[in-house]
Image (tube, rainbow, N blue to C red):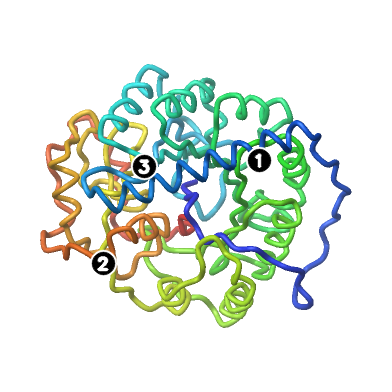
Amino acid sequence: MHRSLCNIYHSLPAIEQGVSTCVLIVSLQMPDASTSVRRRIRAVGRTFRELKMIARGVVSRDHPIQVHIIPMRRCNLSCAYCNEYDDVSQPVPLEEMYRRIDKLAALGTTLITISGGETLLHPQLDDIIRRIRSHGILAGLITNGYLLTPQRIRQLNAAGLDHLQISIDNVQPDDISKKSLKVLDKKLQWLKEHAEFHVNINSVIGAGVKNQWDVVTIGKRAVELGFTSTVGIIHDGTGQLKPLSEGAQQVFREMKKLGKHSYARFNQFQNNIALGRPNNWRCRAGSRYLYICEDGLVHYCSQQRGYPAIPLSEYTVGDIRREYHTEKSCAPNCTISCVHQTSLVDFWRDPQSLPSHQVFRPATTQSPELVQIESRSQESVMAD
């Protein structure tokens, strides 16, 4: 369920044609004045810390900028495209999560996004968020939103959450995904009323999506509620390109027209993904971006689990420097947007020359099923 918070943020004005309008839009209850004031104050502080994160990333190359960490692999849903969940795993114990967060802080990490699985299933999630924030690190959370209630949202406020992202895949639930606007719209209204953190709604286009125009309907609703909206492109089971159909490309072009006020605008990287073309870029996975699985191993990303496969407890600045200079063989056809956007900080410097996909000091307890480098028939969604 890895849907990064650094996806393609864009504002969506009203759509005049080609859009399903079958969603019943319920009147919103406006948040009270005190919630609005707290939200604005927190937004100012969050923006300041984000600017510091970017500045520090430019000045120093020896620390991770963004980390995705998995405290819970189990999920309460079973979306057909997803290869990042199971229905049996137990939550990572809180003390172990503390050790991993403290280690990431020692490495200089500036943003930690909690992913899964379904993150809200972890019984001590708020304590994990507090630990992240105690180090001054930005805290993000990715969820399917099913378990959100007004009280749960207020608890996330109190824990200090900075960013929350919900993935909504369609307007009406289907056999591919139950994460529909029809099911989740009430949750979005609660977020509008109570959330003091930034909220982003992610949706997808590409193979397997029954109604490509749903993405525009979802995006329009997100902006109406005051949230940001992102779009992801379906990729294969290793994070590699799956060119969009002509119909999906039409939706993509419509989204480009609407993206002129975006947080991170459509760029040539996204254009090439839509057309199935490779990109020439320097992937800094394993260095500026880390993916920490539930077993505590460092991986390139959610779709390249197994490399470098070093326990986080043993990860050093030397490992960060090595992977910074390692050319990733999967990069040209990669669609994992969170890695790409994180790597943009260093796009202009330091060519890569070391060979990729080497295993260093692997954990002897590594689970074989976590290594998902070989091509798989199932699909996943582009990380944000």
**Of the two numbered discs 1 and 3 in the rendering, the one whose residue sits closer to the viewer:** 1
Q: Residue at x 49, y 57 (%)?
A: 7
Q: Give the residue drawn at x 78%, y 78%.
A: 17
Q: Which residue is mark 1?
A: 40
Q: Is residue 374 left or right of residue 127?
A: left
User: As shown in the figure, which amino acid type bears the numbered disc 3?
Assistant: Val
The quarter of the displayed image where residue 123 is located: top right
Where 223 sits versus 163, above or below?
A: below
Q: Residue at x 76, y 56 (%)?
A: 224
Q: Disc 1 residue type?
A: Arg
Q: Secondary structure at mark 1?
A: helix
Question: Which residue bears the numbered disc 3?
Answer: 67
Q: Which type of secondary structure does the marked residue at label 3 adopt?
A: strand
Q: Of the residues under marks 2 and 1, which one precedes in the sequence?
A: 1
Cβ atoms under marks 2 and 1 closer than 8 Å? no
**Mark carried by residue 348:** 2
Among the two numbered marks 2 and 3 on one chain, the one whose residue lies closer to the N terminus: 3
